[in-house]
Image (cartoon, grey):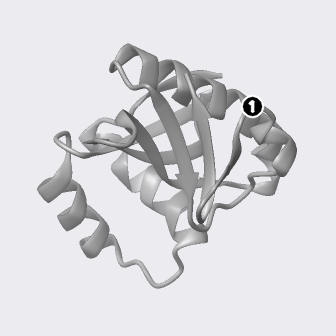
Amino acid sequence: MQFRELSSSELEEGYELLCMLRIDLTEDDFLTYIAAHHPQTYRPIGAYERGELAIYAGVSIHENLELGRYLVIDDLSTTDKHKHHVREMVDYLCDYAKMHKCKSVLLWGKQRGLQLEDLKEFRPKRDGFIKIL
């Protein structure tokens, strides 16, 4: 698997995977959101297998007094064909968080293709899961 932030030319592929999770999301709304929030808060990240986008993750970096600097996995979507690679994406996102000096990773909300066994090092927190780095 190859992991990287999506370029503007790859966003359409990201949208196709994301709309499997967020079925009411229009491409215009997605692109407008990306234009307004990338790269300051929202970052689209993809996992590619043999040139095909296998997993899409939208992440954001925040900071507060409780957690310090932390990464939130806002969106994670994959096809059934690639869900066995989700753990690799979660591991990559934890490394990505460390590269951006985050102290923890939060995951909440609706995700597609994620299994509890992909979150072995996470613990429950409010409406989601947290991993301290």
- Tell me if I can see residue 54 in this picture: no
Q: In the displayed orientation, state which residue is furthest to the left.
A: 36
- Tell me if I can see residue 9 in this picture: yes
Q: In the displayed orientation, state which residue is furthest to the front.
A: 66
- Horizontal arrangement in the rendering, residue 16 relative to residue 70 (left or right): right
The foreground one among 91 and 29 is: 91
**Which residue occupies 64% across, 25% down?**
91
Label 1: few (<14), some (14–19) or many (≥20) C-alpha neighbours in 10 Å: few
16 w.r.t. 122: above or below = below
**Which residue occupies 18% across, 66% down?**
32
Which quarter of the rendering shows the C terminus? top right
Look at mark 1 in the image and give the residue it sits on.
121
The foreground one among 70 and 18 is: 70
The foreground one among 122 and 64 is: 64
* Residue 66 falls in image quadrant: top left
- Expressed as whole percent of the image width and height from the top left, the position of residue 114 reads 74, 52
* Residue 127 falls in image quadrant: bottom right
- Horizontal arrangement in the rendering, residue 69 relative to residue 45 (left or right): left
**Which residue occupies 57% across, 50% down?**
107
Which quarter of the rendering shows the N terminus? top right
- Expressed as whole percent of the image width and height from the top left, the position of residue 3 reads 52, 24
43 w.r.t. 95: above or below = below
Secondary structure under the numbered disc 1 in the rendered image? loop
- Expressed as whole percent of the image width and height from the top left, the position of residue 8 reads 25, 42
**Amino acid type at image mark 1:** Glu
33 w.r.t. 4: above or below = below
**Total marks drawn?**
1
**Which residue occupies 33% across, 20% down?**
100
Q: In the displayed orientation, state which residue is furthest to the top.
A: 99
